Image (cartoon, grey):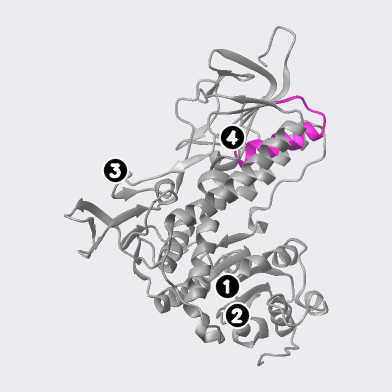
Amino acid sequence: MANDASTVFDLVILGGGSGGYAAALRGAQLGLDVALIEKDKLGGTCLHRGCIPTKALLHAGEVADQARDGASFGVRTSFDGIDMAGVNKYKDGVVSGLYKGLQGLVASRKVTYVTGEGRLSSPTSVDVDGQRYEGRHVLLATGSVPKSLPGLEIDGNRVISSDHALNLDRVPKSVVVLGGGVIGCEFASAWKSFGTDVTIVEALPHLVPLEDENSSKLLERAFRKRGITFSLGSRFSGVEYTDDGVKVSLENGKTFEAELLLVAVGRGPVSQGLGYEEAGVNMDRGYVLVDEYMRTNVPTISAVGDLVPTLQLAHVGFAEGILVAERLAGLKTVPIDYDGVPRVTYSHPEVASVGVTEAKAKEMYGADKVVALKYNLGGNGKSKILKTAGEIKLVQVRDGAVVGVHMVGDRMGELIGEAQLIYNWEALPAEVAQLVHAHPTQNEALGEAHLALAGKPLHSHD
C-alpha cells in the first residue's frame, strides 16, 4: 500500500527494530494510521542478532556448566561436549517463535508493513523502492551495527563481529575478545562454558566499565575463578594472521594468539546515506540528536533507539517508541529517566544495576552525603543452594532515598524489577525494609540489604 494523492499516514516509521515496532504497535493502538518500513526482518537487532540469540547461547552454556558440576549437588551427570548444530537449532527456534508472534501482532494492529530499504526523502516522506510514503510525522529508528577500530577490518573469517559469532558452526578452541563491555563479557562467558579458552582485552581499567567499580571487581574475580583471562588498561595496536589463527598485539607490547578475534567495541548508528542531513536533521558522529521527548530539530521528525545517543538497550528503544507514539496521539508524556533504566549483563555471574554508581552519587550529592552498603550473597539461603557468590550494593543519599542498586551473582537480572521500583519511587531504606520478602529466595537479599541499611540487619553483621 503506497500513498496516493489522498492518503497520508499519521506516522511513517523507518526501521522495524525495538523502537520502531514499539511505536507502531502503540500508535496503532491509539488510533494512528501507521506505516512501518523495514529492509531486513521485523524485530531488528535485538530479536535476530542481539538480546534474544545471545541469551539463548548463554543459557546453553549454563546447562553445560550444570552438567559438569552435577556431582557437587550429588547428581551423577557427565559432560560429553557441545553439539553446535543443536545449540543453533535451539537458539534459532527461540528467535523464530518470537518472530512469528511479532509478525502476527503487527498484522493484528492493522499496521501497514512495508518490506524494503527506505530513505528519508523529505521532512514528511520516506521512499522505498520507488514508492513514496507520506506521513504527518516521520520516526527514524534505523538502529545500529557492530563497530570496529580504525584500521581493524572485520573479515568474518578470523576477525569477527557479534553477528558472525552468533552463527558459528563450531566451538572455537580459543578466542581473544576485544572489548570488555556487556557484549564482550557475555560472549566470553558463553564461550568459556562451551570449553573455549578466552582472553578479554579492555583498554579501560575494568571490565563492564560503565558499572559501579565494585561490580566490575566482583565480575573480574568470578571470571578469574572460571579461568577467563583478561588484560586491562592497555589499548589494542594490531592483529595479524598466523598459520592457525590470529596474533593480537597491544600497545604495552603484550601479544595473544587465538583461533579467532571477536571485535566487541560497541555499536554505531545506521544513518549514513539515508537522507537525514539533506532533510535538515541535526547529527553528531552519525547519531541523530533529539530532546527529552525524542524530537529532532525538524518539527515533523522524531528519532529513537540506537540511532540516538541514549542507552543502547532494547527496552530503552521500547520506551522511547512508546513515548513518541503517545506524544503524537496527544497524550501527556514524561521524559525517560535514563538512570532509572535497569541494566543487565547476562554473564555467569550476572551483573545488574539501576540508578547511579557510588562515584556518580558522590559527584552529584557530595562525598559526605552518600552512604553505601554491601550485602554478601553468602548470607542468602537460596544463593547458597544455587552455589552462587556475589553482592548487592546499595547507594543512598544520607537520610534519604536509595539512588543506586548494584548486584552481582547468578540470576541477579531477575531481581532488577524490584530494584527498579526502589530507585524510581525514591524509596527510603526503611520503607523497603518493612516489606516482607519470601524465604528462601534470592529476592529476599534485596530486603535484607535494605534492613541493614535501615539500621536493623537480620542475617548480616552491623
Q: Earlier in the sequence, mark 2 or mark 1?
A: 2
Quick check: 323 left or right of 164? right
Which marked residue is nearer to the observer: mark 2 or mark 1? 2
Give the position of the N terminus as an image quadrant.
top right
Q: CA distance from mark 3 to mark 2?
A: 42 Å
Report which residue position mark 2 lands on: 386
Report which residue position mark 4 lands on: 141
Q: Which residues are magenta?
A: 15-34
Looking at the magenta stretch, what is its main secondary structure? helix
Report which residue position mark 1 lands on: 410
Q: Nearer the viewer, residue 329 or 164?
A: 164
Residue 12 position within the rendered picture, expressed as x and y whole percent measured from the top left: 66, 25
Which marked residue is nearer to the observer: mark 2 or mark 4? 2
Q: What secondary structure is marked by label 4?
A: loop
Check disc 4 and give the amino acid type: Ala
Q: CA distance from mark 2 to mark 1?
A: 8 Å
Relative height, residue 70 to residue 82 (above, below): below
Q: CA distance from mark 1 to mark 3?
A: 35 Å
Task: State the mark number for residue 402.
Answer: none
Check disc 3 and give the amino acid type: Glu
